[in-house]
Image (tube, helix red, strand yellow):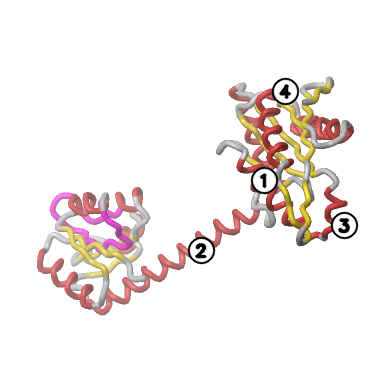
């Protein structure tokens, strides 16, 4: 893909000659007669590379480069006819990607443009790869929910916010009932389909600020910022009921149902995170012990269920 190029020079002959050369090479090019005009142009137009003279009336090219690099993801090539007054190091310190002397030999300019464009594309691909790897590092590959590593990182952030601002913070721990039996009966591939669908259902029941995680094999956690235990129980019941009515077809012509048990708790000021998580786990086991397919909550040592 060819880059979009803006030529900035207060000499109309230079602008026209460059524009005609680059257009003849099938480049996307446009021109601006001053740094001020270039800044206005950039507000409304896509540009990948700016080629600017250093010495111009009004704002000079180095000032323009400095502004561009602070505000935009754009590469800059600076030009000058005054080799004794400006240096490559000076241009690079402002963020320029290359430096070329006038009179510009157009074939050399094209080579420099191609190099800058290639480096730009390489940098974009590297950034995309880094983002992909970062996402993989915090995402469960099967359910596409966050993984347990991210759960503890996110919980640490939310607990810190709670301790600073006093907002409510609640936690759900969700476990699939009799999931081993389902896997043993229908196979792990069918079990994986259940996990994927449950991840989708859980996520659909949450707000944007909430985060859902695959905590273990068949366990999920949900962090509910700014949510009291009472409100968290409502969310848990919405999840439980949505899963309860979902049907699966692990064998042709046969339907299977899944249920979950859920433990709910609310963070208590200044308590340790392991204590908070353990209390949610205790509430979950209350649901298991009372017949499964239930939601139970635990605020302290006194159990409750719904």
Residue 162 image-quadrant placement? top right
- Tell me the residue that label 2 is attached to: 126
Which quadrant of the figure contains the N terminus? bottom left
Q: Residue at x 62, y 31 (%)?
A: 225
Side of 101 relative to 158 (left or right)? left
Magenta region: 45-66
* Mark 4 nearby-residue class (10 Å; few <14, some 14–19, many ≥20): some
Label 3: which secondary element = helix
**Mark 4 or 2, closer to the camera:** 4
* Mark 2 nearby-residue class (10 Å; few <14, some 14–19, many ≥20): few
- Tell me the residue that label 3 is attached to: 184
In the image, which disc is placed on residue 268? 4
**Mark 3 or 4, closer to the camera:** 3
Side of 79 relative to 75 (left or right)? left
Q: Earlier in the sequence, mark 3 or mark 4?
A: 3
**Mark 1 or 2, closer to the camera:** 1
Residue at the extreme bottom: 107
């Amino acid at each position: 893909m060819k880059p979009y190029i803006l030529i900035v020079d207060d000499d109309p002959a230079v602008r026209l000659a460059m524009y005609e050369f680059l257009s003849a090479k099938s480049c996307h090019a446009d021109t601006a007669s001053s740094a001020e005009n270039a800044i206005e142009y950039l507000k409304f137009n896509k540009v990948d590379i700016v080629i600017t003279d250093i010495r111009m009336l009004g704002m000079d090219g180095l000032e323009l480069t400095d502004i561009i690099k602070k505000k935009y993801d754009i590469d800059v090539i600076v030009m000058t006819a005054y080799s004794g007054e400006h240096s490559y190091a000076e241009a690079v310190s402002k963020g320029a990607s290359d430096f070329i002397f006038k009179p510009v030999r157009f074939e050399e300019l094209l080579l420099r443009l191609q190099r800058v464009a290639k480096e730009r594309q390489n940098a974009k691909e590297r950034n995309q790869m880094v983002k992909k790897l970062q996402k993989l590092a915090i995402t469960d590959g099967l359910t596409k929910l966050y993984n347990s590593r991210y759960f503890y990182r996110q919980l640490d952030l939310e607990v810190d916010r709670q301790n600073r601002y006093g907002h409510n913070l609640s936690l759900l721990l969700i476990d699939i009932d009799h999931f081993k039996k389902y896997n043993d009966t229908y196979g792990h591939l069918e079990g994986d389909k259940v996990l994927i669908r449950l991840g989708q259902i859980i996520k659909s029941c949450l707000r944007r600020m909430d985060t859902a995680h695959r905590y273990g094999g068949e366990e999920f956690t949900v962090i509910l910022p700014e949510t009291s235990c009472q409100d968290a129980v409502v969310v848990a019941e919405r999840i439980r009921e949505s899963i309860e009515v979902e049907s699966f077809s692990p064998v042709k012509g046969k339907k299977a149902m899944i249920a979950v048990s859920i433990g709910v708790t609310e963070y208590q000021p200044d308590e340790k995170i392991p204590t908070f998580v353990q209390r949610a786990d205790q509430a979950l086991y209350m649901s298991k012990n009372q017949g499964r397919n239930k939601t139970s909550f635990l605020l302290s040592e006194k159990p409750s269920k719904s």
